[in-house]
Each structure stands twice: as C-alpha cells, then as structure tokens.
Image (cartoon, rainbow, N blue to C red):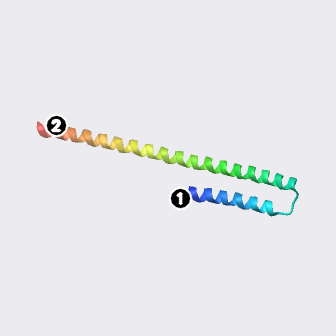
C-alpha cells in the first residue's frame, strides 16, 4: 500500500469518525451544524496541506529524474563519441 493511499484513507476515516461523533453527541442542531462546519474546514485544510506536501515531493522526484536522465544522456553521448574516435583510429 502506498503512503499516499494510506494517508488519504486516514484523512477520510478521521473525517467520517468526527462527523459520526458530532451527529451522535447530545447537542442542539445549531451547535451540531457549527461543529460540522468547523470539522469540515479543518479536514479541508489538512487535506490541502497534504496535497501540497505530496506535490512538493513529486516535484523533487521529477527534478531528480530529469537530472539523472541528463547525466545518462551525457554519458551515452560521450561513449558514442569515444567509439567513433576509436573506430576512426582503427580504420586509418
């Protein structure tokens, strides 16, 4: 299971549990609605923060992959050039 799926499940489960707890609590309708609004705002804020963290990590991974790709490309180009040089030397 990936960390992203686990985190998403954790957030959703927490939100469902919080809403169930609020709805089953012995409070007035107005107080319950306010608590639901607050809980929803908090959950959305946490989800937004989590998405931003995941995006930042993904950006880092993509950047690293691009750097490694460029390094591999450069090494291959150097190897090709070296083979060409050696091939030309052998022909002469």
Q: Quadrant of residue 21?
A: bottom right
Answer whether labels 1 and 2 touch (C-beta < 8 Å). Answer: no
Q: How many marks?
A: 2
Q: Is residue 36 depicted above or below 79 in this figure?
A: below
Q: Secondary structure at mark 1?
A: loop
Could you tell me which residue is drawn at 57 percent across and 55 percent down?
4
Out of 30 and 61, give the one closest to the viewer.
30
Could you tell me which residue is drawn at 55 percent across and 49 percent down?
57
> Which mark, residue 47?
none
- Residue 69 falls left or right of residue 58: left
Q: Is residue 88 depicted above or below 62 in this figure?
A: above
Give x and y (percent) for residue 27: 87, 60
Q: CA distance from mark 1 to mark 2?
A: 52 Å
Local crowd size for mark 2, using a 10 Å CA cut-off: few (<14), some (14–19), many (≥20) = few
Local crowd size for mark 1, using a 10 Å CA cut-off: few (<14), some (14–19), many (≥20) = few
Please identify the residue farthest to the left as the structure is shown: 92
Identify residue for label 1. Answer: 2
Could you tell me which residue is drawn at 12 percent across and 38 percent down?
91
Could you tell me which residue is drawn at 15 percent across and 38 percent down?
89
Give x and y (percent) for residue 55: 57, 46
Identify residue for label 2. Answer: 88
On-image quarter of the C terminus: top left
Out of 52 and 69, give the one closest to the viewer.
52
Give x and y (percent) for residue 17: 72, 62
Out of 38 and 29, give the one closest to the viewer.
29
Q: Quadrant of residue 77?
A: top left
Give x and y (percent) for residue 79: 27, 43
């Amino acid at each position: 299971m990936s960390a992203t799926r686990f985190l998403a499940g954790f957030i959703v489960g927490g939100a469902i549990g919080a809403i169930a707890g609020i709805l089953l609590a012995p409070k007035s309708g107005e107080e319950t609605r306010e608590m639901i609004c607050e809980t929803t705002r908090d959950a959305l804020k946490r989800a937004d923060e989590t998405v931003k963290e995941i995006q930042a990590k993904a950006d880092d991974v993509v950047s690293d992959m691009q750097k490694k790709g460029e390094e591999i490309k450069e090494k291959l180009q150097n190897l090709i050039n070296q083979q060409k040089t050696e091939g030309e030397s052998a022909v002469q």
